[in-house]
Image: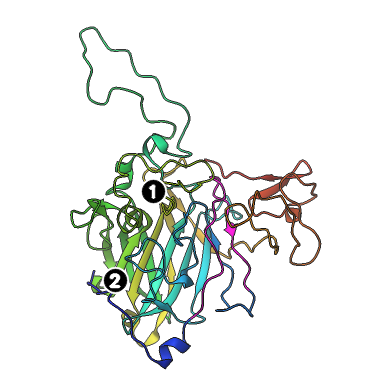
């Protein structure tokens, strides 16, 4: 992975004419079922004119949950620095679904062309559904199983041994070590003609003595990172949400238990910027795609070892992201509103959508994307664990 000095950006009229304004979507909390939390609906008259982008719960308060047009700085906790400027009308988003569930996305991929220090980059972000895997671990893990499992009684003559005590919970529990040196994401990137140009793994987290916490993402050149096709020098930068949590956000002490939260991933007051989602960000030189230009960035599966699902690897296929279910001024919980369902909103086609608990005849009558119409009432739908 080529080094890239993030020391500023090039000015000039052309650059500033070709950037988008502030993003509309704000971080949400939502719930551990992983239902999409839609952001504010941006109309063409809004500054930037960007389309509404979904997010999963747990992004914290740093801005990490903003859409990709918010221009995340690779070295920041989650906010923009002004050094990475998105080019107008280049942002795209695609959700990925399992064959058994075409309603609730298992992940979504965002991509946008950015300008940094005079160089054109393709920024790609993969965000996984926290119902599949999250950045909670140790004694504070959320959604990783039931109560403690009993310990086998010691045999006569046995003394205490390292590791004695309560065993991991549920689906083998979730530890910090599970996230170190085992998880990765594969990206495949094509040019404008559809030809595969880059195929690579991005490391999620590995031991890295150069980082303040002693851990960090090694991108495509270490840990689980690897180039399958193309030159590693094309990958300008790579980071992950847990790398940012531990290093850029200054939470490097959390290498045993993650910051405590609840099933809604409510930010902890001691670590308000902690991102509980599993997110991968990569920046690729646009020159890698030659005269044909950048075409697309895709994934074919999601992986976590372990995951909350029976399988650690799930095949996924792309599809449109769910639209915001209600265009109202009272967004779902965690987005500046109160409890979802306090105030039903208006459906895009007119008529009133129903909050959780409200009467319904079909799923389309329900306000929130995580609700289904069951027994005549809108109720949250939990993705099977």
Q: Which residue is mark 2?
A: 235
- Residue 191 appears anywhere in the view: no
Residue at horizontal 44%, vertical 59%? 62
Specify whether 99 is left or right of 283: right
Task: Please say if 71 is above or below 117.
Answer: above
Please tell me how crowded label 1 is: few (under 14), some (14-19), or many (20+) other residues with Cα within 10 Å.
Answer: many
Q: Residue at x 47, y 42 (%)?
A: 261
Give the extent of the magenta segment: 20-42
What is the x, y in percent for residue 369? 65, 54
Specify few, some or many for label 2: CA neighbours under 10 Å numbering under 14, 14-19, or 20 or more. many
* Position of 310 relative to 93 (above/below): above
Q: Quadrant of residue 273?
A: bottom left
Where is mark 1, residue-wise?
304
Q: Earlier in the sequence, mark 2 or mark 1?
A: 2
- Dividing the picture into quadrants, the one containing residue 365 is bottom right
x then y, percent, for residue 268:
45, 46
Instruction: Decide if residue 329 is on the left or right side of residue 82.
Output: right
- Quarter of the image where the N terminus is located: bottom left
Tell me if I can see residue 171 in this picture.
yes
Magenta portion: prevailing SS class: loop
**Cβ atoms under marks 2 and 1 closer than 8 Å:** no
């Amino acid at each position: 992975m080529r080094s890239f000095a993030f020391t500023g950006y090039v000015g000039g009229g052309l650059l500033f004419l070709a950037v988008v304004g502030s993003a509309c979507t704000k971080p949400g909390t939502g719930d551990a079922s992983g239902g999409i939390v839609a952001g504010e609906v941006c109309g063409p008259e809004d500054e930037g004119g960007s389309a509404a982008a979904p997010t999963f719960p747990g992004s914290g308060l740093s801005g990490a949950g903003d859409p990709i047009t918010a221009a995340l700085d690779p070295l920041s906790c989650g906010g923009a620095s002004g050094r990475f400027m998105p080019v107008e009308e280049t942002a795209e988003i695609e959700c990925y679904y399992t064959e058994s569930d075409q309603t609730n996305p298992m992940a979504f991929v965002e991509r946008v062309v950015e300008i940094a220090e005079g160089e054109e980059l393709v920024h790609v972000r993969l965000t996984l559904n926290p119902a599949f895997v999250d950045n909670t671990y140790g004694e504070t893990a959320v959604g990783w199983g039931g109560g403690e499992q009993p310990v086998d009684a010691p045999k006569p003559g046995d003394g205490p041994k390292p590791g004695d005590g309560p065993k991991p919970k549920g689906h083998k529990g979730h530890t910090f070590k599970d996230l170190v040196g085992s998880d990765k994401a594969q990206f495949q990137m094509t040019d404008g003609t559809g030809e595969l140009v880059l195929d690579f793994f991005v490391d999620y987290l590995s031991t890295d003595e150069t980082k303040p916490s002693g851990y960090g993402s090694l991108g495509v050149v270490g840990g689980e990172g690897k180039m399958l096709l193309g030159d590693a020098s094309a990958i300008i930068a790579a980071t992950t949400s847990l790398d940012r949590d531990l290093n850029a956000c200054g939470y490097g002490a959390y290498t045993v238990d993650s910051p405590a939260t609840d099933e809604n991933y409510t930010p902890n007051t001691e670590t308000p910027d902690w991102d509980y989602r599993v997110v991968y960000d990569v920046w690729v030189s646009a020159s890698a795609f030659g005269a044909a230009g950048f075409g697309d960035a895709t994934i074919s599966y999601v992986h976590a070892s372990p995951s909350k699902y029976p399988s650690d690897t799930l095949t996924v296929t792309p599809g449109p992201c769910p639209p915001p279910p209600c265009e109202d001024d009272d967004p779902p919980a965690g987005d500046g509103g109160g409890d979802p369902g306090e105030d039903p909103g208006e459906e895009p086609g007119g008529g009133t959508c129903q909050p959780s608990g409200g009467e319904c005849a079909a799923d389309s009558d329900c306000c929130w994307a995580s609700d289904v119409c069951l027994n005549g009432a809108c109720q949250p739908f939990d993705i099977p664990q």
